[in-house]
């Protein structure tokens, strides 16, 4: 899962609560390759410094943001051919500048890769996926019906259970996978106390 750095989180918070404008980064989006991450929140990482390496700019037009809470590249992102050993690439970093600048997002690669001299480095279209999750687990936005009880998830979090008219209770989710959802349904005592059996 992608992690927003403290810098990015502060920009968002100040835009919402501090009356400070936050227009986004537009075309100032640069992908960097990282060897290691010490503290993703503080942006303490080790970026590749091998021969022939530089960050790659990916303009806003080359990102698909049509899915809620997600962004993915719509075109190949090529880092060219390594001019020497780049070591093990384990993470991706998103920066707002070609050099130096601010680290905005850190995301681990599904598989780390050793980059040797002469290796081409390219991310094909739709292979870089950055997501913002509001809570675990991530579920679809479809309305499901289990034994006549309507479960209405929000876009990223299954958070409330609606029973009857005007009744909304917290939902305790035990397990979620692509096949089954195991739920513990709340019970209401005559005095209005809600508990989970």
Image (cartoon, rainbow, N blue to C red):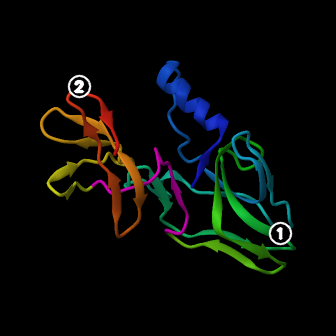
Residue 175 screen position, x and y as percent: 42, 59
Q: Residue shown at 25%/56% (left/top)? A: 142
**Quadrant of residue 163 within the rendered picture:** top left
Q: Residue shown at 73%/41% (left/top)? A: 101
Q: Pointer 2: residues within 10 angstroms few (<14), some, or many (20+)?
A: few
Q: Pointer 1: residues within 10 angstroms few (<14), some, or many (20+)?
A: many
120 to the left or right of 162: right
Q: Please tell me whether residue 116 belongs to the stretch shown in magenta.
A: no
8 to the left or right of 152: right
Q: Which residues are magenta?
A: 126-141
5 to the left or right of 169: right
**Residue named by callout 1:** 86
Disc 2 element: loop
Labels 1 and 2 touching (C-beta < 8 A): no
Disc 1 element: loop
Residue 70 screen position, x and y as percent: 45, 54
105 to the left or right of 120: left
Residue 44 screen position, x and y as percent: 78, 45
Specify the principal SS of the magenta part: loop
Residue lying at the far top in this picture: please name it: 19
Residue 95 visible in the shown view = yes
34 vs 172: above or below: below
Numbered badge on residue 191: 2
Q: Residue shown at 40%/60% (left/top)? A: 176
Looking at the rendering, in which quadrant would you find the N terminus? bottom right
Question: Looking at the image, which is closer to me, 117 or 164?
Answer: 164
Q: Residue shown at 23%/25% (left/top)? A: 191
Numbered badge on residue 9: none
Q: Please tell me whether residue 140 belongs to the stretch shown in magenta.
A: yes
């Amino acid at each position: 899962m992608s992690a927003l750095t403290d810098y990015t989180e502060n920009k968002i918070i100040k835009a919402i609560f501090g009356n400070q404008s936050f227009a986004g980064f537009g075309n100032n989006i640069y992908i960097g390759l990282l060897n290691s991450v010490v503290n993703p929140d503080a942006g303490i990482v080790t970026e590749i410094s091998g021969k022939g390496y530089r960050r790659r700019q990916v303009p806003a037009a080359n990102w698909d943001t049509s899915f809620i809470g997600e962004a993915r590249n719509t075109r190949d992102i090529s880092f060219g051919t390594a001019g020497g050993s780049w070591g093990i690439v384990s993470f991706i970093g998103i920066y707002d500048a070609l050099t130096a600048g601010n680290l905005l997002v850190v995301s681990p690669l599904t598989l780390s890769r050793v980059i040797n001299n002469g290796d081409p480095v390219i991310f094909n279209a739709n292979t870089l996926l950055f997501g913002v999750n509001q809570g675990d687990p991530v579920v679809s936005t479809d309305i499901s019906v289990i034994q006549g009880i309507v479960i209405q998830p929000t876009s990223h979090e299954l958070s409330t259970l609606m029973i009857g008219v005007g009744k909304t209770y917290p939902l305790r989710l035990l397990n979620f996978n692509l096949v089954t959802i195991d739920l513990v349904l709340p019970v209401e005592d005559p005095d209005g106390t809600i508990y989970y059996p």
